[in-house]
Image (tube, rainbow, N blue to C red):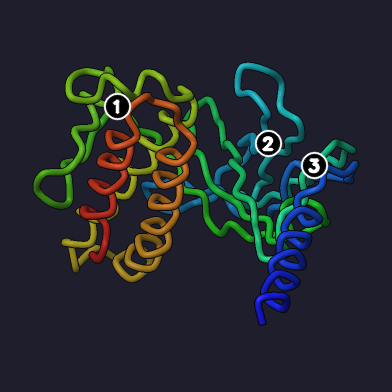
Amino acid sequence: MRHFHAIMFVFTASIAVVACVPSITKMYNGPEVTGTVVRLFDFSPVEGALIAYYSNKAHAPISSTYSDANGQFTLTPVARRQVEIRMPAHAYRRTTIYTEHSDYANSVDIVISVHMNTEYEYYAVGNIIVDDSPEIMAPPLRKNAIDIQRLQQASPPYQFISHCEDALVEGAINKLNITRKLGHRLTQPNNPLHSRIKMQFEKLTQQTIDVWQYLANTCDAGEEHEMAGLKYQVLRELEPL
């Protein structure tokens, strides 16, 4: 019986080692992403918005596209070969895309590759809502929520946010501010856009949560509990509403 257990242990360990052997793999910088860029005020389409993949926001995008007259876009990934440690088949990868327009606040969204970007995949991000009045800060939807203005300035108790990627923080803040604005508009049942606001709000809430979870998981801000606390503040404010 002991001999059988020893064989099983060696076999299991071998699988683990083989699964993580580095190999030269064709990789994409993300899935092919389709969606529509719309204006917060009335959900009208936004033409000419840049949607892009970046490896570093300080450099030129890896791949990019522009929204058309209907606000629609298709962002095509770029393939490259690199040394990659292959993970188990059930693993997946999150990647950021950025939306930029001179008349609106920048946005960031999370897209998912089921196969760790090793295969050409498709991802429908839905509507990307952009705000033409980002300087107006909406009040929180619940008590004890994040103070956006202090967070933007990395003021106490948010000093640690200065260690995170600026563009990602900016996009996450804009996403939360738009979610708050839509949430407050839901309290106006006579608004002719009420049914559409409700639908957009439900989708945007999840997009915002995804962005803040990504920020908390990827930002090296020193104290892990501080980023986790920030993430849970967002979760408490938005789940469930």
Pick out the residue farthest to the bottom.
1
Residue at 61% in and 36% down: 49
Residue in front for this viewpoint, 239 or 3: 3
Q: How far is mark 1 from mark 3, CA to CA?
A: 42 Å
Asked if residue 102 lies left or right of residue 208, the reply is right
Which of the 4 quarters of the picture holds residue 149? top left
Q: How many marks?
A: 3
Residue that numbered label 1 is attached to? 135
Verify CB contact (< 8 Å) between mark 2 and mark 1: no
Question: Above or below — where is 238 with respect to 97?
Answer: below
Counting residues from the N terminus, which is met first, the one under dot 2 or under dot 3? 2
Residue sitting at x 26%, y 19%: 159
Residue 186: x and y, percent?
Answer: 23, 62
- Left or right: where does residue 21 sit relative to residue 221? right
**Secondary structure of the residue carrying numbered label 1:** loop
The disc at residue 114 is none
Secondary structure at badge 2 equals: strand
Q: Earlier in the sequence, mark 1 or mark 3?
A: 3
User: Which residue, given by chain and number where applicable, does mark 2 sit on?
Assistant: 53
For the point 80% across and 45% down, the residue is 28
**Observer able to see residue 70:** yes
Residue 32 appears in view? no
Look at mark 3 in the image and give the residue it sits on.
84
For the C terminus, give its image quadrant: bottom left
Q: Amino acid at mark 3?
A: Glu
Closer to viewer: mark 2 or mark 1: 2
Could you tell me how far apart the alpha carbons at marks 2 and 3 are, in whole angstroms? 20 Å
